[in-house]
Image (cartoon, rainbow, N blue to C red):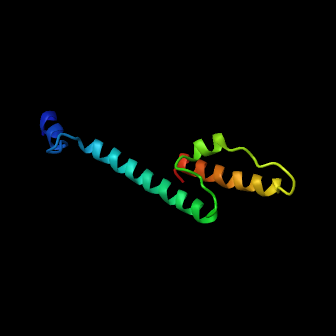
Amino acid sequence: MGARKAGLLGQRPWGRTAGAVRIRGTKAASDCFAARVYAELAEDLPDEDLGEDLADFLERYEPVTGHGVDAEADEEFLETVREAHDRIALGY
């Protein structure tokens, strides 16, 4: 089979190549994974408003200070959010 025919067989009728479909499928799987990790985080921290972007949340977060504030619990909270953010970034 000639190179031209092989190339044409990889084309989709709407103009995308088979590779583009795989990339889009990978992106969808990645989005699905991110949504699952975010849902787990929301389940673990139901009272927290994390927003849509964990990186943005971590960047803007300021620890609560004052009398009666549990610094250890605050650090544990931040570590949980960081772990979820890292899982999403790494894909596992």
75, 3: nearer the viewer = 75
Q: Is residue 9 left or right of residue 81?
A: left
Residue at x 33% of width, y 46% of height: 24
Quarter of the rendering containing residue 58: top right
Q: Residue 67 location in percent, x, y?
A: 87, 54
Residue at x 41% of width, y 54% of height: 29
- Quadrant in which the N terminus is drawn: top left
Q: Residue 92 location in percent, x, y?
A: 54, 54
Q: Is residue 89 left or right of residue 7?
A: right
Q: Is residue 71 left or right of residue 42?
A: right
Which residue lies most toward the right here? 67
Q: Residue 41 location in percent, x, y?
A: 59, 60
- The correct choice, above or below, for 84 with respect to 18 in the image is below
How many numbered dots are placed on residues in this image?
Answer: 0
- The correct choice, above or below, for 43 with respect to 49 in the image is below
3, 7: nearer the viewer = 7
6, 76: nearer the viewer = 76
Residue at x 71% of width, y 55% of height: 77
Which residue lies most toward the front here? 67
Residue at x 16% of width, y 43% of height: 14
